Amino acid sequence: MTPPPESSVAAALRIIDKKRKISFNKHTMRILLSNDDGLFGRGLEPLIYELKKIGDVFVVVPDTEKSASSHSITLHSPIRLVEKRKNVYTVTGTPSDCVRFGVIGIMKNRVDMIVSGVNDGPNLGDDCIYSGTVAAAREGAMLGIPAIAVSLVPPGRGNFKLASEYAAKIVVTAKKIRMPKYSFLNVNIPDTDGIEGIELTKMGKRIYDEDIEERTDPRGYKYYWIAGERLSGHPDPGTDIKAISMSRISVTPLKVDQTDFSFLNDLKKNKIEKMIAGSRKQTVGSSK
C-alpha cells in the first residue's frame, strides 16, 4: 500500500531539522515571537527590542499581513521558510503555521514563552475569534507552552514602544506565576501615555458593522466588502472593552478548551441524548 503524501508542513520541518543548528543561553528565557501583521508590522521591532532584554528571541512571522486569519493552517499548498536575518524568519503561511514552525522546526520544542504581537489594533471580546494574533498565542497553548497575545488599541499616536515595554513586564510576570497548561493571556493596551493601571478582565461583546458593501469593477462585475469600518462594543463592568474605555490595560485569561460546561450540564439534566435516540427511532419507524 502506498503511504499518504507527506504534508508540506511535515516535509519542511523535516528538512529544517537536518540543516538548522541553533544555540541557546541556558540562563535566559527562550521566547518565540510571532504576529499576524508580518515582518513590517509596526509593533514587531519595538517588541523584539524589549524582549531581547529578558531572553533569547526567535521571530517567525507571516511573509504578508494575515490579519483576521483566525486559527487557520496551511494544508493544501507548499510553505516556504525564509531567514531574513539571524533568528528572524518569515513563513508563507498563517500565524498558526508560524508558531508551529517556530516551536517544532526552529527551536526544537525548547520554548519557554510564546508572544504574539504587538498587534496594530484591538483584539477585544469577539475579535479573539477572528484574530490571527490571538490564534498564534492559542497555537502555543495547544502545544502546551505559555503564550501571550498583545494588541495596541487606538486611537492614539501608535506608541508601540510603550506597549512593548508593558508586554515585556507581563511576560516576566507570567513566567513567574506558571500559567496553566493549555491556557494563555490576551492583552490589550490602550494607545495613550496616561495608562490608568492594569485590570484582569473577561471577554466583552463586540458590535460589528453589518453592512455588506457592493461595488462594480471596471469590467462591470460586482464584488463585495464584508468588513465594515465601524466597531463598537458593550462596556460592561469587568470586561476588556470596559477596561480599555477607562484607559486601563486589559489582561484576559483564555483557554483552548471551548466546552460550555454549563450548557453541557443542562443537556445532561434534560437527558438530551435519550431524546435524540427516541426521535431517531420514531423517524426510522415512520419510514417503514
Image (cartoon, rainbow, N blue to C red):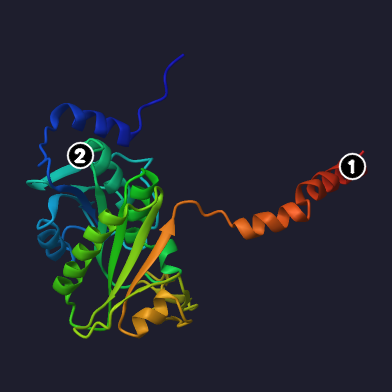
In the picture of the structure, the residue carrying the numbered disc 1 is 287
The residue lying toward the viewer, choosing from 144 and 45, is 144
Q: Please, what is the three-letter code of the amino acid marked with disc 2?
A: Met
Q: Residue at x 36, y 84 (%)?
A: 245
Please say if the residues under marks 2 and 1 sit with CB atoms less than 8 Å apart: no
Q: Which of 22 and 210 is in front in this view?
A: 22
Mark in front: 2 vs 1: 2
The residue type indicated by label 1 comes to: Ser
Label 1 secondary element: loop
Q: In this view, does 226 lie to the left or right of 87?
A: right
Q: Tell me the distance, in whole angstroms, between the alpha carbons under discs 2 and 1.
A: 59 Å
User: Taking the image as drawn, is residue 42 in sight?
Assistant: no
Q: What is the x, y in percent for residue 136?
A: 32, 54
Q: Residues within 10 Å of mark 1 (few under 14, many from 20)?
A: few
Q: Which comes sooner in the sequence, label 2 or label 1?
A: 2
Question: 220 left or right of 279?
Answer: left
Which residue is tagged 2?
Answer: 107
Which residue is painted at 76% across and 47% down in the image?
A: 273
